[in-house]
Image: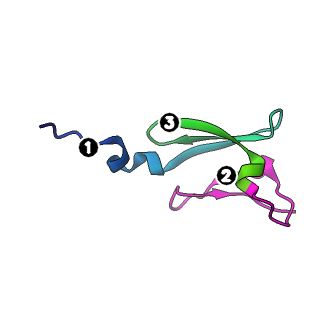
């Protein structure tokens, strides 16, 4: 038996390290503290909200590192 925790039990995959808006593809690239990264469409993140997002000012929530903050106009 090993003492290594399974990836999903370590917690670092839940904490965000960086979020970058990719204007050419209208996507957001997110990197977690464990190094995993993925890219997803802005439309999937916004899900039809009525406000207008300011994607270039996107940032990781600084206190918990568990969410994305997207300012609106």
Q: Is 47 on the left or on the right of 10, as rendered?
A: right
Predominant SS of the magenta segment: loop
Residue 40 image offset from top left, x and y in percent: 68, 41
Q: Can you identify the residue that label 3 sits on?
A: 36
Q: Residue at x 77, y 60 (%)?
A: 71
State which quadrant residue 24 falls in.
top right
Q: Which residues are magenta?
A: 46-73
- Tell me the number on the disc at residue 5: 1
**Separation of disc 1 and disc 2 at Cα?**
29 Å
Above or below, 21 against 47 in this view is above
Whether residues under marks 3 and 1 lie with C-beta atoms below 8 angstroms apart, the answer is no
Q: Nearer the viewer, residue 57 or 28?
A: 28
Q: Is residue 25 above or below residue 61?
A: above
Q: Please report whichever mark, 1 or 2, sits nearer to the chain's N-terminal start.
A: 1
**Which residue is found at the position 50% from the left and 36% from the top?**
36
Secondary structure category for the residue under label 1: loop
Few, some or many residues within 10 Å of mark 1 (<14, 14–19, 20+): few
Occupied quadrant, residue 50: bottom right
């Amino acid at each position: 038996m090993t003492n290594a925790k399974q990836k999903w039990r370590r917690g670092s995959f839940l904490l965000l390290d960086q979020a970058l808006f990719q204007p050419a593809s209208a996507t957001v690239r997110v990197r977690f503290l464990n190094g995993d990264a993925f890219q997803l469409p802005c439309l999937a993140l916004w899900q039809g909200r009525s406000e207008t997002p300011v994607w270039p000012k996107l940032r990781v929530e600084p206190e918990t590192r568990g969410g994305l903050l997207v300012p609106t106009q």
